[in-house]
Amino acid sequence: MNQDKDNKTQNGTKPLDGIRVLEYGIFHAGPGASAILSDLGAEVIKIETKAGDPLRGWVDAGNISFQLPHDRNLMFDYSNRGKRGIILDIGQEKGRNIFNQLLKDSDVFVTNLRKSTKIKKGLDYTKISEINPKIIYASVSGFGPEGPVCDMGAYDPLGQAKSGMMFAANSMMPSLIHLAVLDQSTAIAASHAILTALLARERFGTGQEVHVSLYSTGIWLMSANIMANSLARFGTLSGVLDREHNSPLRNCFCSKDGKWVMGVHHPPERYWEPLCRAAGQEHLIDDSRFCDEEKRRENCAELVEIFDKVFATKMLDEWMELFVEHGLMFCPIQNFEDVLVDPQALENEYITDFQHPDLGNIKIPGYPVHFSDYSAGMDKTAPTLGEHTDEILQEMGFSDKEIQNLREEKVI
């Protein structure tokens, strides 16, 4: 890490310093947006009931365990990193008054409760904007603010199902992209919307509501596939790109050491000859079966079979040297363990060290954007349930006696 970056990190200067976010949300898609804002320096206060965000109790997803020592939870830590937590019963008058006071001092309010629940709790935009007209109100839902299923709850796999994503994974059978990929994409989209609304408020002086859904984000992610189907003149496109019907210039191959590599080259005519030369198959350059893209498409299965045998003759590192030498764009197909130790990821701090209170030093994803004048990224883990309740109330001017009374009355 260079010295300038060290200094910025030590100074703690982040682009959203001074922005306060109030969150009343559960699971990831909504709270994940607040966590991103926290990475950028915003102060995020997470309100929970005494039962806590249900994500705290989610111990596994299939064969993946979220349980950490001391009753901590990996997904909750990830979704709520950097926040301060308060237990607050907004159904009681005193609790609602505290909530309203926090809201008046906030720039952003984030929630992902169902439409009917927000109205029932008085957390809809109409009610919130009455208290703070300049608030940026960010709502995250399953399927959008209107329509026949606008009040239906949803999780990541349901958004993938409805948006077509489950048919984008190279299979005729629906396939789930694991884990929380659409949840995180929705959180990114929501943070993008919030930042845009904050800029608009800075320019024009007005608050507003922004609404993002799992469904809208899934469709956005699948834009190319959906547009291709929209423009298809003969039937629909499955999106399946099996190896036997995919050019060697846009395909994956297994090397001698059992490691896979992926290549993508456009326009194909430019790269056909370099590929043949790198593979030691110069005789294929002018072969009548493969001499142009149309012929290669007609005889694709035969051509892929030839290259399968060729790729099996050398180790991945040997192939990578040849690809660089010939100006070809191939990349090793890495698993998640590979990514954690990838020099490219480490050098750019896409993977970074973090001192976890229970696990010690661990590797985590870093913030994906480099700022020339600011730092960004995770500074602390998620709060334990109600961890900062007293601290926040003291900052608001409550005395120790008043806080004790609120606790006895089960407001906090």
Image (cartoon, rainbow, N blue to C red):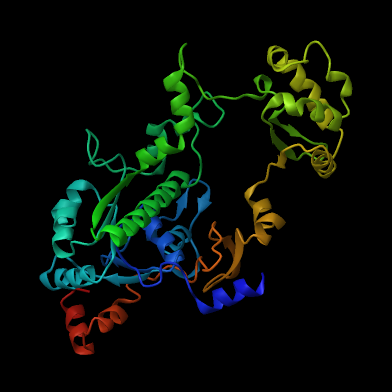
Q: Residue 199, how many percent across, how many down?
A: 34, 58
Residue 124 appears in the rendering? no
Q: Residue 273, how many percent across, how many down?
A: 81, 26
Nearer to us in this view, 376 or 171 = 376
In this view, 198 is above or below 242: below
User: Which residue is at 53% across, 68% downward?
Assistant: 373
Q: Is residue 374 left or right of residue 322?
A: left
Q: Residue 122, how many percent across, how many down?
A: 14, 57
Q: Residue 261, how many percent across, how many down?
A: 72, 38
The quadrant holding residue 108 is: bottom left
In this view, 22 is above or below 293: below
In this view, 338 is above or below 215: below
User: Which residue is at 45% across, 65% downward?
Assistant: 40
Nearer to us in this view, 368 or 186 = 368
Considering the image in quadrants, where does the N terminus appear?
Answer: bottom right
Q: Residue furthest front?
A: 203
